[in-house]
Amino acid sequence: MATALCGVGLAVLLLPQRLQQQPMAQGVVSVHLAADGRLRLWNQPVASAELVRLLATPSVRRRLVRLRIVPDPDTPWGDVRRLLSQLDSLPLPLELQLPASPPPAG
C-alpha cells in the first residue's frame, strides 16, 4: 500500500513536468512574453536581441522545428507584433499560442 501511494505521489509530481517538456522534445521552443515586455526562454529572462542571436546559431536551428510565442493575457498586441517582426528574419516557422480567455465574471 505504501509503495502504491509513493508511486502515485511521484506521478503527481513528475507528470506535469514531463508534459511541459514534451514540446521541447518535439523541436518546439516556447518564448514567453510578459505583459511588461519581458521575454523568458527556457524559464530564463532574455533580451530580444539576445534571443534573435541565440536562435540564429546553427546548433539551435538544427534541432528546432518551430518557435512558439506565448504572450501573457495582458500583453499589448503591439508588443506581440514587434517581437514577431524581430523574429521574422529567422528561418524558423513561427506560431502564436493565444492566451486563454478569462473566465466570465459573476
Image (spheres, grey):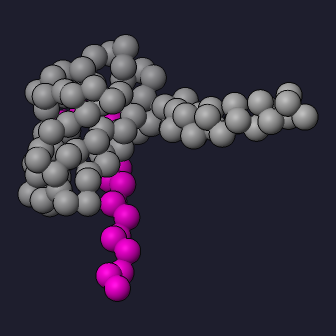
Q: Is residue 17 magenta?
A: no
Q: Position of residue 62 (x, y in %)?
A: 42, 20
Query: In the image shown, does 83 or 9 lie closer to the viewer?
Result: 9
Whether residue 94 appears in this view of the structure is no
* Segment colored magenta: 89-106
Q: Position of residue 46 (x, y in %)?
A: 19, 27
Residue at 51% in and 38% down: 20
Query: In the image shown, does 105 or 40 lie closer to the viewer?
Result: 105
Residue at 13% in and 28% down: 47
Residue at 39% in and 34% down: 29
Q: Position of residue 21 (x, y in %)?
A: 52, 33
Q: Position of residue 102 (x, y in %)?
A: 33, 71
Q: Farthest top residue? A: 59
Answer left or right for 65 relative to 15.
left
Whether residue 5 appears in this view of the structure is yes
Answer left or right for 26 relative to 41.
right
The vertical placement of 79 against 40, above or below, is below
Q: Quadrant of the C terminus?
A: bottom left
Answer left or right for 6 relative to 85.
right
Q: Is residue 93 magenta?
A: yes
Q: Which quadrant of the view contains residue 57?
A: top left
